[in-house]
Image (cartoon, helix red, strand yellow):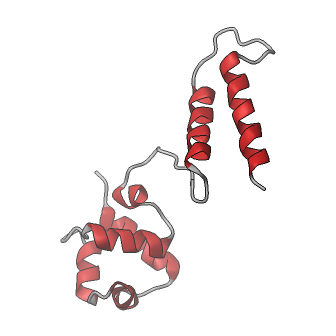
Amino acid sequence: MYDMGARLRTLRKAKGWSQETLGRKLNKTKSVVSSYEANLRTPPLDVLTDLAALYGVSLDYLAGVEGRAMLPAEGLTPAQTELVRTIILELQSPHPGAARTLTPRQMDILNGLLFEFTRRG
């Protein structure tokens, strides 16, 4: 079973912070931080969001959702974000008997990439 408290404690210690120091950053008392780390209380979403930002991790990581990679899309346009998703899906889909030629779909993806890269000025 996943131990969120242990993960929170490990992250805090990796920063070299005491429970009191973290509490100040979160505007919480040391005893509240301690209760999160002892799994006596579950941090509410706003606190989890603050913790994720302080530690530089995702909410998924704090929640113990493992095995799902995340790619940052900050700074990309909606069209570029969709293009990245399409590339990922294409790379994940099997291509039986893949030859040394590109499929029409792969050509469309490459054309989309060229368009997006030349659009950025």
The residue shown at (39%, 73%) is: 51
Foreground residue, 117 or 85? Answer: 117
User: Which residue appears at 48% of the width and 64% of the height?
Assistant: 57
Apparent side of residue 22 relative to residue 104 in the rendered image (left or right): left
Residue 105 on image: x %, y %: 65, 21
Residue 118 drawn at (x, y percent): 79, 46
Judged from this view, the residue extending furthest toward the left is 40
Q: Nearer the viewer, residue 96 or 107?
A: 107
Q: Quadrant of residue 75?
A: bottom right
Viewer-proximal residue among 71 and 67 = 71
Q: Quadrant of the C terminus?
A: bottom right
Q: How many marks?
A: 0
Which residue corresponds to the image point at 75% horizontal and 53% vertical from the top-left? 120
Q: Is residue 21 above or below residue 109?
A: below
Above or below, 25 against 4 in this view is below
| Whole-percent x, y for residue 28 in the image | 28, 86
Q: Quadrant of residue 109?
A: top right
Q: Is residue 59 left or right of residue 30?
A: right
The image quadrant of residue 98 is: top right
In the displayed structure image, the side of residue 89 where residue 30 appears, left or right: left
Q: Residue at x 35, y 67 (%)?
A: 6
Residue 74: percent from left, percent from top: 57, 59
Residue 62 as seen in the image, left or right of residue 85: left
- Identify whether 50 is placed above or below 4: below
Q: Is residue 12 above or below residue 69?
A: below
